[in-house]
Every structure is written in structure tokens, then in C-alpha cells.
Amino acid sequence: MESHEKILDIPVEHERNIFGGLDCHVKKIERILKVSIILRDGSVKIQGSDSGVSAAEHVFSELIALSERGNSITEQNVDYILTLVEEHSEVSLAEIDKEIIGYTIQGKPIKPKTLGQQKYVKQIQDKMMVFGIGPAGTGKTYLAMAMAIQAFKNDEVGKIILTRPAIEAGENLGFLPGDLQSKIDPYLRPLYDALYQIMGADSFIKNSEKGLIEVAPLAYMRGRTLDNAFIILDEAQNTTPAQMKMFLTRIGFGSKVVITGDLSQKDLPFSTESGLEQAAGVLKNVEEIGFSYLTNKDVVRHPLVQKIVHAYEKFEAKEKYKESRKNAKNNNRKAGR
């Protein structure tokens, strides 16, 4: 195979960020694209096949653009760019990175990190109601929370309502000490954490006391009409069909709704249909409602989480196949009697 070579200039001030600790990013690019990369002061020499050298050049150009925009390059960034290259996608992570939703209390920009997340954010901007469905770590709740806080700050809505069903994840919390609020708070803690990170504890407490930000279990929504609010229903895979219908019929004028969930992590009793699953089928053709399906490629936590999600997806697909084969055999036996 004919060997090709390319020398790229790397800004010295961005070298450490782009190469990673102990050159871990460079080693990953070499391994995945099957190229040889030689680091020299202010440049890299890439050697390998024509396609490999071209792909590596594109990866480095993306990483340089991200670094120059002030990003700390992570393994997840490198993995995602390599995935796009392997799929011959024309999507640019550096272009996605330009879209800023808002800032955390520490001034860190909040932005989509994958194409799936970018599409999800765009749907929230354009649609009155959006379902964000996908595995853990894809930023479903966090991005929706950031959008809600920005809408609230820009006076696009009068209040923020955050809710999730109080379903125990395989544990019985009913005997926890304290009043009702103390028992409910553990279920809502992830929502509080995101609020504190994005808007700060003081701002949250002040607006909460005024009734402008509300964090409550789904059961508290019954009998209400929610006007001029940004409403987020989190962990929607744990709603029953009746609860989901109750929630969806609370929506009033001037409101925006985001419903998030992971269908692979239901805590409902075995064989109970999820309200999220049913709603996705019933409402799929309603024009004002958007559905955003995120995948393991959109996981932005530690790369190990992406591998875990992918492994479980393969395992669950195998189990479903075995179950369908078993059911087919049973049906054939019954038909033969």
C-alpha cells in the first residue's frame, strides 16, 4: 500500500490541550485511523494511507478549532470526531460548538456537543412540545433545563415547572425519616443539582420563594392548568399511561413542554406499559410535537458510559430476539395441536 505524508502546524499554546495527557488523544487517533503521527515542536507529521492521512488531518483541524474557541479537549470530543470521520459525515463538531444556549453560574458556556443534541435543542426552540428520548448521559434533562432558564431570563415564560414521577428505583424509601418534603426530595435531587449549577443556589431560592420556579412530584400536577410556563417532565419512562395523559392535558397557553426519558431504565412494575412509550406512539403524527431520539453516540459523560450503554443495547437486543423466537415456537406448538 502506498504511504502518504502530511505535515500540519499546531499552535504551540494549544498543543497540550489537543494532544491530551501523555499524548493520549494522539495515540487514539493513530490506533483508530491506522496512521503514524510524529510530534515535533509546533507541528505533527502524519504518515499512512491516503484516506487515513486525510482523515487524521480533518480530526486535527477540528480539534484545533475547538481549542481555539476555548474548549478543554476531552476524550469524548476525540471519540465523537472519529465517529463522524468513520461515518464519512459532513457534520463539523467545531460548527456545532458555536451554538451557545447559556452559561453556568461559573461562566462556563452550555452548548450541544453532538449532532443529536443540536437537533434536540433546535426542536425545543421550534416546537411547543418536545419528547427527548435516549440513554443516560445524553444531556436530555440538562439541556432542557438550560433552555428553560434562558427562556425565563428572557421573559419568554413567567415561571419554570420541573417535575418527575416519584418512583423508587428498586428500593423502598417510604420509611425515610422526615416530613413529606424530606421524603420527596431524594427523587428530585438531580433537578436541584442542575438548577444550582446553571443559575446558582441564591437565585433559585429567591425565585422559588416567589413561586416562579417550582420543583414537584408529578402527582402535584393533577387538577392544574399550567399557563405561560416552561415545563419539564423528567424520567417520563416511569409514568403510567394515565399519569402521562393527566400531565399532557395540563398544558395551557404560552407554555413550552419538554418530556425526557430513557425507555431502557423503567422502574415500573414488570409488564406495566410506560406512559412515555404509549405517548410516543399516539402522538407521533401531531405536527406541533417534536420527537428527538438520542443514542449512545450522544453520550457526553465519561467514554466508559458510552461503552456501557452500547453493551446493554446489544444485550437487550439479543434478549428480545430470544424472547421472540421462544414465543414463535410456542405459537407453532399451539397451532400444531
Image: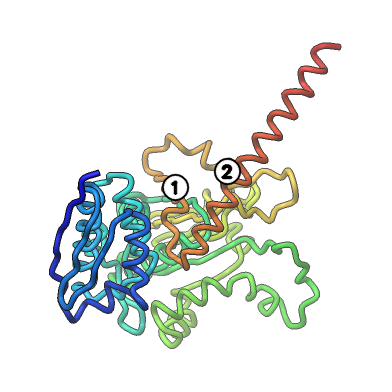
The amino acid type found where label 2 is placed reads Glu
Label 2 residue SS: helix
Give percent across and percent down for residue 227. 43, 59
Q: Sequence order check: which comes first, mark 1 or mark 2?
A: 2
Residue 153, image x and y in percent?
A: 31, 73
Q: Residue furthest top?
A: 336
Can residue 91 be seen from the camera position used here? no
Is any part of residue 264 visible from this angle?
Answer: yes
Q: Residue at x 22, y 63 (%)?
A: 60
Residue 317 drawn at (x, y percent): 60, 41
Q: How is the image coloured?
A: rainbow
Mark 1, secondary structure of its residue: strand
- Asked if marks 1 and 2 touch (Cβ < 8 Å), the reply is no
Q: Quadrant of residue 320?
A: top right
Q: Residue furthest bottom?
A: 202
For this view, does 244 lie left or right of residue 57? right
